[in-house]
Image (cartoon, grey):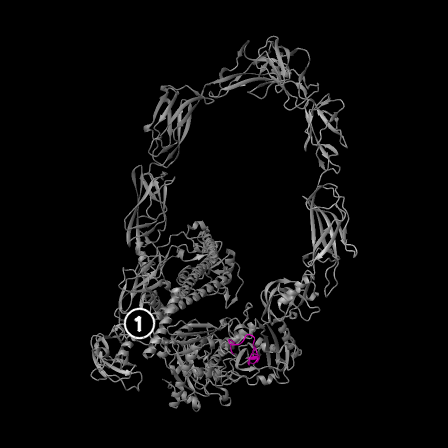
Amino acid sequence: MAAGGGGPGGPSAGAGAGGGGDGYKTVYLFDRREKESELGERALQVGESSDYSRFRACVYQTLGISPEEKFVITTTSRKEITCDNFDETVKDGVTLYLLQSVNQLLLSATKERIDFLPHYDTLVKSGMYEYYASEGQNPLPFALAELIDNSLSATSRNNGIRRIQIKLLFDEAQGKPAVAVIDNGRGMTSKQLNNWAVYRLSKFTRQGDFESDHSGYVRPVPVPRSLNSDISYFGVGGKQAVFFVGQSARMISKPADSQDVHELLLSKEDFEKKEKNKEAIYSGYIRNRKPSDSVHITNDDERFLHHLILEEKEKDSFTAVVITGVQPEHIQYLKNYFHLWTRQLAHIYHYYIHGPKGNEIRTSKEVGPFNNIDIEISMFEKGKAPKIVNLREIQDDMQTLYINTAADSFEFKAHVEGDGVVEGIIRYHPFLYDRETYPDDPCFPSKLKDEDDDDDCFIIEKAARGKRPIFECFWNGRLIPYTSVEDFDWCTPPKKRGLAPIECYNRISGALFTNDKFQVSTNKLTFMDLELKLKDKNTLFTRILNGQEQRMKIDREFALWLKDCHEKYDKQIKFTLFKGIITRPDLPSKRQGPWATYSAIEWDGKIYKAGQLVKTIKTLPLFYGSIVRFFLHGDHDGEVYATGGEVQIAMEPQALYDEIKTVPIAKLDRTVAEKAVKKYVEDEMARLPDRLSVTWPEGDELLPNEIRPAGTPIGALRIEILNKKGEAMQKLPGTSHGGSKKLLVELKVILHSSSGNKEIISHISQHGGKWPYWFKKMENIQKLGNYTLKLQVVLNESNADTYAGRPLPSKAIKFSVKEGKPEKFSFGLLDSPFRVGVPFNIPLEFQDEFGHTSQLVTDIQPVLEASGLSLHYEEITNGPNCVIRGVTAKGPVNSCQGKNFNLKVILPSLKEDSQILKIRLLPGPPRRLKVKPDSEILVIENGTAFPFQVEVLDESDNITAQPKLIVHCKFSGAPNLPLYVVDCSSSGTSILTGPAIQVQNIKKDQTLKARIEIPSCKDVAAVEKTIKLLPSSHVARLQIFSVEGQKAIQIKHQDEVNWIAGDVMHNLIFQMYDEGEREIDITSALAEKIKVNWTPDINKEHLLQGLLPDVQVPTSVKDMRYCQVSFQDDHVSLESAFTVRPLPDEPKHLKCELKGGKTVQMGQELQGEIVVIVTDQYGNQIQAFSPSSLSALGIAGVGLDSSNLKMTFQENTESISVRGIKFVPGPPGNKDLCFTWREFSDFIRVKLISGPPAKLLLIDWPELKESIPVINGKELQNPLIVQLCDQWDNPAPVPQVKISLIKANNLKLTPSNQQHKTDEKGRANLGVFSVSAPRGEHIIQIKAIHNKNTIEGPVIKLMILPDPEKPIRLNVKYDKDASFLAGGLFTDFMISVISEDDSVIKNINPARISMKMWKLPSPGNRPPANAETFSCNKIKDNDKEDGCFYFRDKVIPHKVGTYCIQFGFMMDKAYTLSSEQVIVDVLPNQPVKLVPEIQPATPAVSNVRSVVSRTLVRDLHLNITDEYSNHTGIDLVGTVIATIKGSSEEDTDVPLFIGKVKTLEFPFVNGSAEITSLVLAENSPGRDSTEYFIIFEPQLPALSRTLEPYILQFMFYNDVKKQQQMAALTKEKDQLSKSIIMYRSLFEASKQLLDEMKCQVEEAKLKEAQLRNELKAHNIDIPATQQMTHIEALLKRKVTEQEELKKKPRRSCTLPNYTKGSADVLGKIAHLAQIEDDRAAMVISWHLASDMDCVVTLTTDAARRIYDETQGRQQVLPLDSIYKKTLPDWKRPLPHLRNGKLCFKPIGDPIFARDLLTFPDNKEHCETVFGMLLGDTIILDNLDAANHYRREVVKITHCPTLLTRDGDRIRSNGKFGGLQNKAPPMDKLRGMVFGAPIPKQCLILGEQIDLLQQYRSAVCKLGSVNKDLNGQLEYLHTPDMKKKKQELDEQEKNLKLIEQKLGMTPTRKCNDSLRPPTKDMTDCPIPPKRMRRETTRQNRIITKTDV
């Protein structure tokens, strides 16, 4: 180096020893300005008195830097050296950087010298630096805890998750074992890392020369439980822990605000090396490097560090402690006791993980500051799934058990002298369910299991807690494991019995939480003085209630709390059969409820149930009874244990006592037998009353079921009450605890009726001592019905007929009462009405003396009487229904409504013999008809009606009425006479009349007959009358006349009159006559009744004179007028009518009429004809034409072609027909034709339309002369719209013409070529086509078929360009010369996706690229279903080729053979683009061992003469294989030496081979050695029944490495017979061994598959939870149930919303974009940007109007290609030709802002026009383009604002072009106004306008839809893997698998027995001779997941074939 050396031991050593020399200090400088800078350091000698300027000059000189060059000098912590800090920063031996800027990334790593001499405290406090075991605990977890302490301190300021990871890296494939502790804390600078290395440098002494890693210690504020993370204290624990665990530590750290990673390595090996070389031991280097730079890791034992360092990229700050050289005993402990030590760590940091309240499983977790600590431990072992546990998930650490088994807690606080504060908590663990609930430590059980204990025996000792102390101790919230506090004076069991039982004191646990005022050892294993300080007499204890500190007597408070816990929570009687919760109102109000009721208890080993007979003790008197229920105070539910309760007892016998008693359960007599209680009850029951005795002393006895007449008496009754012994009794037997009760007898007579039972008699009798129970005679029973006489014994006081639920004696006698003989009568219901002469019946009803219905049994003659009537009857009937039949009454009743009469009925011989019946008698039926007037002949005038008065009479001449009583009058003597009808149904009389009698043409008098009768009454005679009819004097006839001069001409009815059209008919008169032909004078009354139909206005004066109104004749000869005159009065309706026919007038007009269509095709004649006629003034045709008139008719019109005109005279119509109208070709439209004849003329208009279709033209299509460029597979720019035209190019509107496309077969159009038809306008829209065709020019022609003629259409030329984004093949690059050895790693495969234009497609998702591998031969060319699939690796920084994907380090299959590899690119769900197949030959790997071709059976031999018995092996072929059992070593030549050895080295008595030799050699050729026979020597030495081994060792000179020999065990015997027996056993043993291996393989594979499935389930759950949280961030909640339904509905709604937003009209650029032929074409400028504001879009688009059509390319070559393709018509702009240094800075402020301050206040909202642009793609390129085009152009609101802005800006700087949102422009030179500076309206820009961007809501919806789709996939995946896992679990529990497990157990037992018989060593699991090839995975580099799959697949094959 220029200024000094740089190695260790150079200047560094000198500096460390004695400073920098006399007056100098050495500074080490790294130049890292450029990548090419020298890697080493420069040592600079700086004078002690030098200042910063001298030092900088020295740097210039040493490094040869020019003074103009800019750089900074910083410390390794990136602190810039300045004049101010030079002296304090630049010390002797300091390392500095030379950089371009402070934040520059380190381009290469550096080394920093450090010193870490021990602090002086090391000597003072060295006595407690060691970890030691206590209470049988391994201290290793506590060493790990020291490292976690450091991480907790480092992460204490984290705002988010505080993540701490402990990784146990025990995978030998990744290097030697290591332990890594990683946190995401604030990291350390290089100086802080130096401080860490200094021993005993605590946080309190890091001052002076040391830069503190805590920036000066500040004591944290008090927090609950002192959880302040301030637990990294002494500068000792970390180093001690590191070197306790291993022999080397690598510290890697990155501060949050630094670009550099600092790395320090401390190792025992390095210390020893320095000591040996006599170097400074406590000095070294800190490596400062960039993140993820692992080039310095070259040791293969540490290759796991590459992965750890690679993870640095994602981290802002971190610290990692990597320990290597881990002690072997520690590795075993960490592996074997993983659950134990992770549980211990969860215990140590319990309150940091779960918060001050701890892990309360029963309560929901509150979100708080302690939920962000995440301590995760993971262990990685080779071939096993990683073990990962989060300490938060551990639920069985001791503090969790203490918290969740406690029923209540007692919190207190202790204040020690000084600032020492201890928070304490005591928890109570009650006695429950016949056991203590105090938790035992599962890992360190403190008491014996009581499996052999008697149930009735209890261990007293210290009961629940055992010998454990009460309190565990925590320092700053962290457990100090080796310190505990036994108790305090106030919580020790009292010597005398206290408030709570003594055992309650053994049911408490506790914890103490101290602050940092108490000393702990440096390794935090023990407190130094905690217990002494707490038990000091000055220590003050206070209780904490509801979070408040209260000074009370702590011992009294604790005793009361303990008593309360015992009473509340200890449960000792088991209450079962829960019934419900009740309240007990009989108790005092405070204890009324709640009470839980139960039907049974278990107590003292006995069960008491409801209904069980019991007896009490300690009650006065003693109670005998049955249990009703049990009471337990409190709101309980279900079975529960309690210390006591109450029992409710029903006193027995209930017949005597009928009482319920409630006593404490403790007062039940548990000694009495149930039989004794039962006997007592039965004896008491015999004394109760049993029956009644009844006698009748005075007669009138009532017999059971007797029927008695009403009023019969019942005699007197005498009653006696008897008990079961027949003894008479008057009261209940007396009891020992109360007075006896008297008995009464109650008599009741009950009537049973349909409405219910009714009590009619009730008496009570009591016993008088001398007289018995007595009831008097009863004579008042008169009601009919069924009766019961009931006698009932009742109690004297309550009248109760039951006692204690048992009925007292009773007796019931049933009887009936019936009616007596008849004494009176009444009338029944009569059938009314009653009519004169009509018979009716009178029903009679009879009653006895009590009014009961009776019957007449004797004959009787009734008498009937009524005033004014004659009465008689037919008979009277006897029996139940007595009726007087056939009663008839006659006499006058005066009216139709009848008359009331009193009818008296007399029945002799009855006590009450007469009754009056009131009836109303109506007239009888009709008998005759009476008509008035009475005379026989009647006279009336024709046309009038005649009334008759009629009456209908009965047989007594009463006017009568009845329904349908209708009277008719029929006339005869003339036709059409009326019929008179009248209805007399209601009154019997009425006026009979009807219509007038009208006889036609009567000239004189006429006689008629009238017959009056009732049709419905045939027996009533008819009445006849004669009528004389006279002629009428009313109007009968009307006549009309037309007066011409003196002559009147009659116009008859319906005559036709001819008259000139349009003229008026005058002088019309009329006359009227009566029936006698007499003329009638017209009066005003008659004139009003005359009407005419041709005018509403009639002159009445004229009518009186006989004149009618004038008639107007129609103007058209076709219109005939119908005229009518009518007269109508009450008698007649007359009319007279005539028709007026118009005649034509004089000629007046010429009229032309077009017959046929009005349209004429161009070049064609008019299809119809034009008819010409002459009409009068009203248009009536006049016959004026003749054949000679043709020459006088003239025709003229614009464009008329007269060559084919034809005119003909039509005789039948007197008209001229014109044909052959034709026009010269011209523009279509309306044409007028003029016709003239004489002085008359007329015009007619026809429509000229286009001619027949002759051409096809394209609408809105570019010029067809040149080819249209289109990318293959993309759509054409415009739709194909064709128009039919005639030969003159006029559009031909001909519909339904077929249009077809003609193209070559290699040109494909999508949608496919379908036939289209033209619409009504003659147009056909063929739509927009996607074109697919080979590269080059192609032709499309459009044709039409019209009337079987083909119309040729235009020819379209398409230039097909390749699609740069369409994948067509995969390009695969790899080392084709590489050889592939089994189990090794493939060479790197580089895959790229090639598009149609042979370019590499970029921006492809790597997940869509896959690699499949399978073994050949496989049927077909497609990969099989079980082909192995690989994903591509992550892109590395040095992968320079963009768009390439790499498959690295893929494992070569273990088996030799030919394999096929194929790569795929998933284009969509249905199609995958595959590469060409790569065929590789997998070759064997390096030779490893010698194995037999076929495993021989275990030989059993002897040394007898027989050669067969001495033969060890026959035909043994030994081959060399690699580690994967592939045959190898074909080219090796050598020998195989066979040697026999014993099971131990001391065994010298070893059998010999034949020839008495110890070894034999066999040739090894072509990779194999053949041993035809191997025989022992006869009488060979050897011990009987001993196991020996033949070792076949290969000797191969060409091979440098030693191969593993093949070892064959055999049994040696001296006895032939025994040898034969043992040979059979060894054969059986070999078969069993083989079967056992198969079974073990099966179960191991199943287990691995299950583990993998569980991993997949966890991954799926994690993914689902992650996506759910992301959805929540978007305010989308997914319900727990019916997820898929909800997701689908949500997706559908979101997609619909997005589509609706997209469909909304949005401004778009209609300028066709240039087709991108390659990736170098960006497109037209109009399409590169979008603008949201409409006004801004309009003015900017106009401003850039000349550039909008310009195509932007990346390169000039691409621009030139477009220029050539378009023959120079397309303007282009290549980006590589833009001078970019003059482009504006997009971050530059507006001109009115200078140095962040306003120069003036602008108006009009100014903004750079470029800032309004958004770029959908290629943002960087677009900024270049628009930066050049727009420059600094500014846009404002209006012209006034723009002028104001320019006026102010030019005062300070140049003003750019200004645009306004109103469309004005002020150029940069200040010019404005004129058309060229005013933007036209938006519609005038012809679509050349920037489009509007997609709405932001649409983008948000797109993100939500993408998330929902991902979440739907995740839910489906989770369901799928859960289903697979459940299926696998079910499979493992199938009977078949259970059977296989049993078979394996049996075979292992049999194998063990056989080996014992053989005397052999038990079979070793690692025995290579027995191990199947599939299980040899010890050194296999296959990743664990793949290894599991292979093992599973192979073992499934084994299952099917071998097991």
User: Residue 480, how many percent across, how many down?
Assistant: 53, 81
User: Residue 336, how many percent across, how many down?
Assistant: 43, 77
Residue occupying the far top of the picture: 1004
Closer to the camera, 417 or 1399?
417
| Left or right: where 1272 falls relative to 1128 | left
| Left or right: where 899 falls relative to 386 | right
Q: How many marks?
A: 1
Magenta region, residue range: 448-473
Residue placed under numbered mark 1 in the picture: 1631
| Left or right: where 842 falls relative to 78 | right
The residue sitting at 41% across, 68% down in the picture is 1651
Specify whether residue 454 is painted magenta.
yes
The residue under label 1 is which amino acid type? Answer: Gln
| Left or right: where 1185 falls relative to 724 | left
Secondary structure category for the residue under label 1: helix
Specify whether residue 755 is painted magenta.
no
Closer to the camera, 1419 or 315?
1419
**Would you place residue 1893 above or below residue 418 in this image?**
above
Closer to the camera, 266 or 1600?
1600
User: Residue 1741, how many percent across, how many down?
Assistant: 43, 55
Please, what is the dominant secondary structure of the magenta stretch? loop
> Visible in this render: residue 265?
no
Q: Check the picture and name the quadrant holding the N terminus.
A: bottom left
Closer to the camera, 446 or 54?
446
Q: Check the picture and name the quadrant holding the C terminus.
A: bottom left
User: Residue 104, how many percent across, how many down?
Assistant: 42, 74
